[in-house]
Image (tube, rainbow, N blue to C red):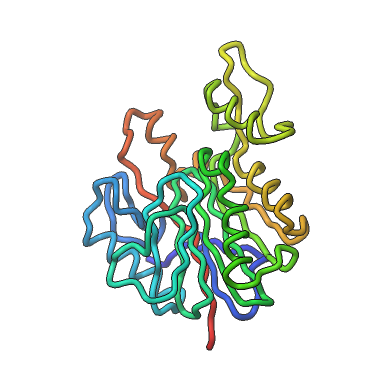
Amino acid sequence: MTLDLIRMPVLDRPGIVHAFTTRTGGVSEGPYASLNLTRSRGDDPAHISQNRERVRAALGLDHLAFAVQVHGRDVVAVEGWPKGDQPAGEGDALITDRPGLGLVCQTADCTPILLFDPVRRAVAAIHSGWRGTVVNVAAATIDAMTDRYGTRPADLLAAIGPSISPANYRVGPEVVAAFEAAFENTGGIVSPRDPEGGAQLDVAEACRRQLVLAGVPEGAIERSPLCTYGEEARLFSARRAHHRGESGLFGGQAGIIALTGA
């Protein structure tokens, strides 16, 4: 089966390849069907390895680099080829200036962000869930690219991939309070509170604003309209599985970006 890869026009540029994967085109079965790329939820490891190899081959890359994601703001600079399926490190963002190395952020509702610096030729893949957004992993990644590669935020291009939409993402008062503490203005990010103190949350919009505040031009940011929860045939969703009493029984898609050429 052919892979169904989502690409964003903002990153349709010479010198890079990128994609946001979907459920289609893999070998996993059951709740992981079929292109599950995540190892932590009980899928057959052999199936995951085959799925990862299919993605690598489809993008024409030498290697894929994964991180152990922990919902924080640590950034891992990938300077060499990972050994087999060994993670590149622990963190929620990967950066590199090495061609042929695909940086991977894994998601199943959280927000994937891909960055490209066409001037200094560097890329990043960011996993930003609500916790990572509260601690601003996006800004931490841009700071790391600036320190290591000389990136100017004004040169960056950014793609925000499929994530859970606010219509399907109600959070409790503790998460609302965390966003109110992290953002000066939560209008358009957090809906008015309901009687229980909860609200609908737009994490992708929060990430977009953080990119702008970090210096990325608004016109250089593109956001996917796809909702992971609502696109059941196409995308994995942790919250959808939870609502069905199947917590932990779901796969994960990914955002991937790599430099090409020497």
Report whether 7 appears left or right of 91. right
Residue 72 is situated, as x and y percent measured from the top left of the image, at 47, 46
Residue 258, placed above or below residue 191: below
Residue 3, placed above or below residue 131: below
Report whether 88 appears left or right of 92. left
Report whether 176 appears left or right of 129. right
Residue positioned 74% across, 57% down in the render: 215
Residue positioned 65% across, 52% down in the render: 223
Report whether 220 appears left or right of 56. right
Q: Quadrant of the N terminus?
A: bottom left
Residue positioned 33% across, 70% down in the render: 53
Residue 124, placed above or below residue 245: below
The tally of labels here is: 0
Residue 79 is situated, as x and y percent measured from the top left of the image, at 44, 74
Residue 175 is situated, as x and y percent measured from the top left of the image, at 54, 28
Residue 44 vs residue 217, the one in the foreground: 217
Residue positioned 52% across, 44% down in the render: 132
Residue farthest toward the front in the current orientation of the protein: 147
Residue 71 is situated, as x and y percent measured from the top left of the image, at 45, 44
Residue 80 vs residue 150, the one in the foreground: 150
Residue 112, placed above or below residue 98: above
Residue farthest toward the top in the current orientation of the protein: 195
